[in-house]
Image: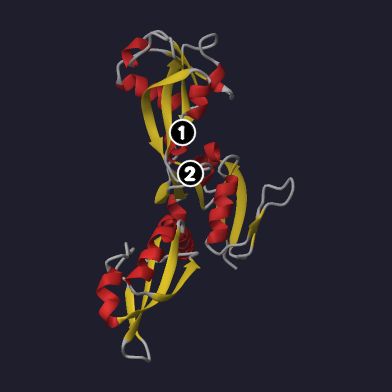
Amino acid sequence: MSVLKLGLPAGSLQEATADLFRKAGYKITFPSRSYYPAIDDPELHCTLIRAQEMGRYVADGSLDCGLTGHDWIVESGAHVTELAELVFSKVSRRPVKWVLAVPNDSDIHGPKDLQGKRIATEVVNITKSWLAGHGVSAQVEFSWGATEVKPPKFADAIVEVTETGNSLRANNLRIVDTLLTSTTRFVANPQAALDPWKRQKMDDLLLMLRGAMAAEGKVGLMMNVRKPDLAHVLNKLPALKNPTISPLADQEWVAVNTIIDEDTVRHIIPQLKAAGASGIVEYPLTKIID
C-alpha cells in the first residue's frame, strides 16, 4: 500500500494543526512521548517535527510533505514546492510578523540606527538579509529563547515573532519595523509533488483542510418564506453566495437555504422573522467546498 509521509509541526502550532485536521474529518491523536501521531487514514504516516526543521526534511525527501511557516522556509533556504497557504496559527487566523523591537527609551528608530549594534534573534538569516538590504552592518546573534528579556543588557535590539504585540509591550519594547510576514504553508518535496499518487493524495488532503477552514465562523440557515415576502427576506441576508431557493409542496411557499457569519446570526434571525420567514433553523457547518 502506498503511504504519504506527512510532517506535522511540533510545538506552538501542534494543537492548532490537530484541531484543523479533526475539523477536516481526520481523527488524529498524540500518543504520550511519541513523535508519530496516530491518524485514521492508513495512507498517511505522520511525524512530529519542529516547524524550524520541516523544510529541511521535506527538501531531502525524509518527508513527502509537511506544514510549516513561510518564515522557516525562508530562514532555512530549503528547496521545497509550496502547494498551499493555510492561514492559521496558535492564537488566531492572522499572519505572524517578525519585527525589530527595541526598549521604549532606545535611540534606535530605523534600520540605519542599527549600524554596529547587537541584535538577538532566532531568525539569523532573515535578519542578516534584511540588514544587507538596508546597507547596514550589525552583529546578529542567535537567541535560544526568552528573546524579549535580552535588551538592553544583552542586546541593543531583537527580531522577534508576534501576532498581537502584547508580549513585546509587556516587556517595555516598541516595534521599529517589520521584517517578514508569515503564514503556514503546505510544502512538498519536489519529486514527491511530481508523483501522481502522492500529488493526488496531497491535493485531496488540502481540499478537506481548506474546506474546514472556510467553514470556520460560518453557519447555515434554513427557513420557509411566502413568495410575496421573499424579496424582503432576501434583502436581509448577507449571503456567502446567492441563497438556494427551493419550491415546497405548498406553491405559496419556498424554502431558503444560505450560509452566513456566525456572529451575525443573533442580529439577523429577528430581522428575518419580522420580514416574514418562519421555521428558521440554524445548523453548524464543518466544511465548505467550492
Residue at position x 50%, y 43% from top?
89
Q: How is the image coloured?
A: secondary structure
Residue 85 shows in this picture? yes
Residue receiving disc 1 = 164
How many numbered circles are shown? Answer: 2
Residue at position x 44%, y 53% from top?
191
Tell me: 277 left or right of 281: left
Q: Quadrant of the N terminus?
A: bottom right
In the rendered image, residue 226, in percent from the top left (x then y), is placed at 32, 81
Q: Which quadrant holds residue 77?
A: top left
Residue at position x 58%, y 60% from top?
44
In the rendered image, residue 93, in percent from the top left (x then y), is placed at 45, 46
Q: Which quadrant holds residue 23?
A: bottom right
Secondary structure beneath dot 2 equals loop
Tell me: 69 left or right of 2: left
Q: Which quadrant holds residue 261?
A: bottom left
In the rendered image, residue 265, in percent from the top left (x then y), is placed at 42, 61
In the rendered image, residue 100, in percent from the top left (x then y), is placed at 41, 22
Label located before the other in sequence (2 or 1)? 2
Tell me: 34 left or right of 178: right
Of 221 and 119, the residue lying toward us: 221
Q: Residues within 10 Å of mark 2 (few under 14, many from 20)?
A: few
Q: Residues within 10 Å of mark 1 (few under 14, many from 20)?
A: few
Q: Quadrant of the C terminus?
A: bottom left
Residue 203 shows in this picture? no
Query: Separation of disc 2 and disc 1 at Cα?
Result: 9 Å
Residue at position x 31%, y 66% from top?
241
Q: Amino acid at mark 2?
A: Ser
Label 1 near label 2: C-beta < 8 Å? yes
Residue receiving disc 2 = 92
